Each structure stands twice: as structure tokens, then as C-alpha cells.
Image (cartoon, helix red, strand yellow):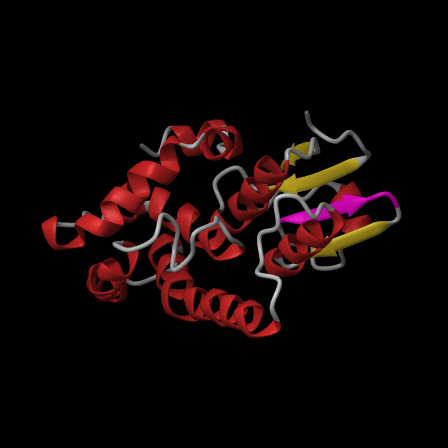
């Protein structure tokens, strides 16, 4: 049963940072009004609550939050069940570090590939590096159902939007990445993940 409240989320239906927050909302069973905003088409109401007009932006009554990791952690604390960060400080810090590394190592490549202003040689290089990096970490997905965890965490919420976009990025993973491909199949089949998808995202695969 979803929690009802006055939550609203300004979200880009094509953007992987917005997708993260929609996954968290779906996992928590929280009903929020999803306000779809396409890049470059900022509604005045968004500018009123967020001086950067960046997406995603979460509005919870008088509170407005932006920056996807801040929004995700707020939702995890505001709606504690199921928890998406470990309880213990060391494990929690490790999760935050993994999110930071996904941000630096993978999101940066994804953003470069998807940016229409990127030069083609830079795109080709980013695709190559991302494919090799994902294939290289693939064995880490063999032992546990989620990324280095028995439970779904915010780390998965950051990773899954990137993996869902691989066809759009022009990246195909080969046989050596089987543990990662199996992880993707399992996670993409989850009902909560399916609920998180926008119409634009459904068309990506």
C-alpha cells in the first residue's frame, strides 16, 4: 500500500539522474506527483523552488531538494522502509563511496556520450572505456543478488539507470560480462523497476 502525501518530483523522463529518484520512490511505495520536464523547458514553478532549475527536484510541502544523491538520501530517511542504505556507519560510508565512484567513473562517461556537443572521437573513447570498465567489474556481481549486497541499496538505484541505457549509449556487453548481464535481467524484471520507468525510458529497449 503506497504512502499518500503531497510529494512532487520534477523529473526529466529521459535522464538517468531523474530515473534514480523514481526508482527510490517505487521501492519505497511512495506516491508522488511526477512532473515531467524536458531538458531546456523549465516551468516557472520549478524556478521558484530551485534556483538552478536542475532535475530532478523534489518538493515535499515547504521543502525543495535537488541533486539526486541528496534527494535519494532524504527519501531513504523520510520513508525508512525498506532501508536503502546500511545501518552501520562503515558500511554506509562504503555505499556512499561506491555511489561517488559510479558518479566519477561511469556517469561522467555516460554524460559525455549523451551530450550532443561531444566530439565523436571523445564519444568513441568513452564508449570503449565504459564497456571495458563494466566488463572488468562484472565478476563482483556473481556472489550476491545486488551490487555487493544481499539487499537492494542506493548504489543499485544509481547503477540501474545507466545499465538500462546501454543500447542508447551504443554499448553491447559480451559473454565475459555474464554476471553483470544476469544482474541486469533480474533487476529489470522487478516490478518496482518497471514502475519507475517513464514512457521515454520504455522505448530505450
Residue 25, by quadrant, is top right
The residue nearer to you, when weighing 4 against 84, is 84
Seen at 69% across and 31% down, the residue is 31
Figure check: 199 above or below 64? above
The residue nearer to you, when weighing 167 against 1, is 1
Residue 134 visible in the picture:
no
Is residue 192 left or right of 141 when viewed as pictured? right
Figure disc tally: 0
Residue 106, by quadrant, is bottom left
**What residue occupies the far left of the structure in this picture?**
175
Is residue 153 left or right of 77 when viewed as pictured? left
Q: Which residues are magenta?
A: 56-61
> x, y percentage for residue 126?
27, 64
Magenta segment, principal secondary structure? Answer: strand
**What residue occupies the far right of the structure in this picture?**
62
Q: Quadrant of the N terminus?
A: top right
Residue 126 is inside the magenta segment: no
Seen at 47% across and 35% down, the residue is 193
The residue nearer to you, when weighing 172 against 30, is 30
Residue 61 visible in the picture:
yes
> x, y percentage for residue 198?
50, 31
Residue 167, by quadrant, is top left
Seen at 63% across and 39% down, the residue is 28
Is residue 103 left or right of 52 when viewed as pictured? left
Seen at 29% across and 55% down, the residue is 143
> x, y percentage for residue 96?
54, 68
The residue nearer to you, when weighing 197 against 50, is 197
Q: Quadrant of the C terminus?
A: top left
> x, y percentage for residue 158?
47, 54
Amino acid at each position: 500500500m503506497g504512502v499518500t502525501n503531497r510529494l512532487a518530483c520534477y523529473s526529466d523522463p529521459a535522464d538517468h539522474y531523474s530515473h534514480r529518484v523514481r526508482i527510490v520512490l517505487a521501492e519505497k511505495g511512495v506516491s508522488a506527483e511526477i512532473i515531467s520536464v524536458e531538458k531546456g523547458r523549465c516551468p516557472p514553478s520549478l524556478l521558484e523552488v530551485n534556483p538552478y532549475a536542475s532535475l530532478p527536484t523534489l518538493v515535499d510541502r515547504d521543502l525543495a531538494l535537488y541533486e539526486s544523491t541528496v534527494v535519494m538520501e532524504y527519501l531513504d530517511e523520510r520513508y525508512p522502509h525498506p532501508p536503502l542504505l546500511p545501518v552501520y556507519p562503515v558500511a554506509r560510508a562504503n555505499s556512499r563511496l561506491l555511489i561517488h565512484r559510479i558518479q566519477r567513473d561511469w556517469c561522467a562517461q555516460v554524460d559525455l556520450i549523451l551530450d550532443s556537443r561531444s566530439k565523436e572521437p571523445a564519444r568513441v573513447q568513452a564508449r570503449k572505456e565504459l564497456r571495458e570498465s563494466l566488463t572488468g567489474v562484472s565478476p563482483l556481481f556473481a556472489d550476491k543478488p545486488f551490487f555487493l549486497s544481499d539487499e537492494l541499496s542506493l548504489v543499485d538505484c544509481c547503477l540501474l539507470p545507466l545499465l538500462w541505457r546501454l543500447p542508447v549509449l551504443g554499448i553491447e556487453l559480451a559473454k565475459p560480462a555474464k554476471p553483470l548481464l544476469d544482474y541486469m535481467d533480474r533487476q529489470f524484471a522487478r516490478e518496482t523497476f518497471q514502475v519507475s520507468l517513464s514512457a521515454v525510458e520504455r522505448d530505450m529497449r
